[in-house]
């Protein structure tokens, strides 16, 4: 070290780095709005509505599915971040579905419809995590188009059951196997321009999930909380606490219901994951997404650094600090990170490849609480004390 007489401060760039959890509550909304201001909402282009931006919402106009969908989201009372994709409206149902589903132009590479959600991070600097297509997500083709996009974005899809019968809802749900799809039945009744109107449920459910994230956290199940802004449902789905009620029948078959119990509540925890899948609970799927992506994004700084003992220690410490903080907040039950020598042979290190392991235990929803009741005579003696 060169000679220096005095006090010196040196910036040290090594050491663990804090990890910030990614946004869980960004909604991706696809729909129509023919009277929208095209300069604000160009077709097939991600546009951000941040919070309750009344000016931008007004620019959607009054026609199509997007204005009423925004009303459903805002009914939650929480200003959500909404990435809007406006597609062209068409009177022909087949053409309309084609516009909604979209795709990638083989000549230009331009994405349209649902596929345009993949451009959101580049365009508006946010990644949608809750995907909805109100009025159209009761179509098999639409949900099938949403699933690969949700896989890429690490998002969930709130889809709509046909809203006719329980049998139809189950038949629709049986078309999909994905831990990212959450189907809700039935349509909801709301007040629109002073008139009671039946509308798709997905925007209200998406806004509801945002509110639960805001009030409790992304680890919390959205089930058994009142959905704001709805006055009724298209058909009654009773919940009386028995195994044979309609709500339980739907839930058992992985369809969430909107029930009335001191308000209209979302009722159901299951995604459409395969039976006994570790991510069968929607809240567990979202917990894993939040943790996995947060850790990944927080360690871009480590890419291309020299693989040294200091790097290993810094990264492991960063992840362990993050997992400890999530445990303290009771967003997980515990977790740890480590570098396994067996997973990092010299041949892999020589190729610049480094493997780090981490695990965690999610907070599972108490879906089934059982009290065991026993009649006993042992307290009769209390009469004589």
Image: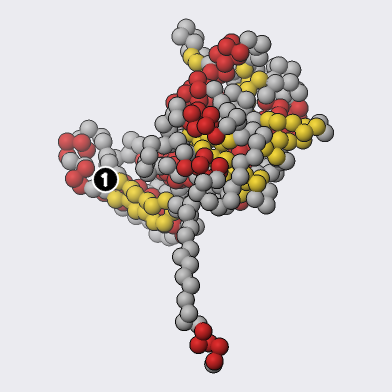
Compared with 139, 233 (above or below) is below
Compared with 88, 208 (above or below) is below
- Image side of residue 234 versus residue 347, left or right: right
In the depicted view, which residue is nearer to us: 68 or 113? 68
- Image side of residue 362 versus residue 385, left or right: left
* Residue at figure coordinates x 41%, y 42% from the top left: 279
* Residue at figure coordinates x 55%, y 34% from the top left: 166
Q: Is residue 157 visible?
A: no
* Residue at figure coordinates x 56%, y 42% from the top left: 246
- Image side of residue 294 versus residue 86, left or right: left
Compared with 189, 139 (above or below) is above
Screen quadrant of the C terminus: bottom right
Q: Residues within 10 Å of mark 1 (few under 14, many from 20)?
A: few
What percent of the width, then of the height, locates residue 87? 62, 17
Number of marks drawn: 1
* Residue at figure coordinates x 52%, y 39% from the top left: 250
Q: Which residue is mark 1?
A: 308
Tell me the SS state at disc 1. loop
Q: Is residue 259 visible?
A: yes
Q: Which image quarter: residue 342?
A: top left
């Amino acid at each position: 070290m060169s000679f220096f007489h005095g006090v010196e401060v040196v910036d040290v760039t090594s050491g663990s780095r804090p990890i910030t959890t990614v946004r869980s509550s960004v909604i991706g909304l696809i729909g129509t709005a023919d009277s929208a201001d095209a300069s604000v909402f160009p077709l097939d282009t991600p546009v951000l509505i941040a919070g309750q931006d009344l000016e931008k919402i007004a620019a959607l106009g009054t026609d199509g599915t997007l204005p009423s969908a925004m009303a459903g989201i805002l009914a939650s009372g929480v200003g959500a971040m909404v990435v809007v994709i406006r597609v062209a409206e068409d009177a022909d149902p087949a053409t309309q579905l084609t516009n909604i589903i979209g795709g990638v132009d083989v000549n230009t590479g331009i994405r349209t419809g649902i596929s345009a959600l993949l451009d959101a991070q580049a365009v508006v600097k946010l990644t949608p995590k809750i995907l909805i297509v109100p009025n159209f997500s009761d179509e098999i083709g639409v949900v099938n188009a949403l699933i690969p996009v949700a896989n890429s974005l690490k998002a969930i899809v709130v889809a709509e059951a046909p809203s006719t019968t329980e049998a139809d809802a189950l038949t629709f749900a049986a078309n999909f196997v994905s831990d990212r799809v959450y189907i809700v039945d039935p349509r909801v009744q709301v007040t629109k321009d002073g008139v009671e109107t039946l509308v798709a449920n997905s925007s209200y459910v998406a806004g509801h999930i945002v509110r639960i994230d805001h009030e409790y956290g992304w680890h919390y199940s959205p089930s058994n909380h009142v959905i704001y802004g709805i006055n009724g449902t298209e058909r009654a789905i009773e919940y009386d606490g028995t195994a044979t009620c309609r709500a339980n029948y739907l839930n058992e078959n992985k369809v969430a219901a909107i029930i009335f119990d001191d308000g209209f509540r979302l009722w159901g925890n299951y995604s459409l994951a395969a039976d006994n899948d570790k991510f069968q609970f929607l809240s567990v799927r979202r917990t894993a997404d939040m943790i996995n992506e947060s850790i990944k994004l927080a360690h871009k700084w480590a890419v291309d650094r020299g693989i040294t003992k200091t790097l290993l220690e810094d990264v492991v410490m960063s992840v362990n600090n993050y997992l400890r903080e999530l445990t303290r907040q009771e967003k997980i039950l515990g977790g740890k990170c480590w570098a396994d020598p067996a997973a990092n042979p010299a041949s892999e290190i020589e190729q610049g490849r480094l493997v780090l392991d981490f695990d965690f235990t999610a907070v599972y929803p108490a879906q089934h609480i059982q009290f065991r009741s026993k009649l006993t005579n042992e307290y009769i003696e209390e009469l004589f004390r």
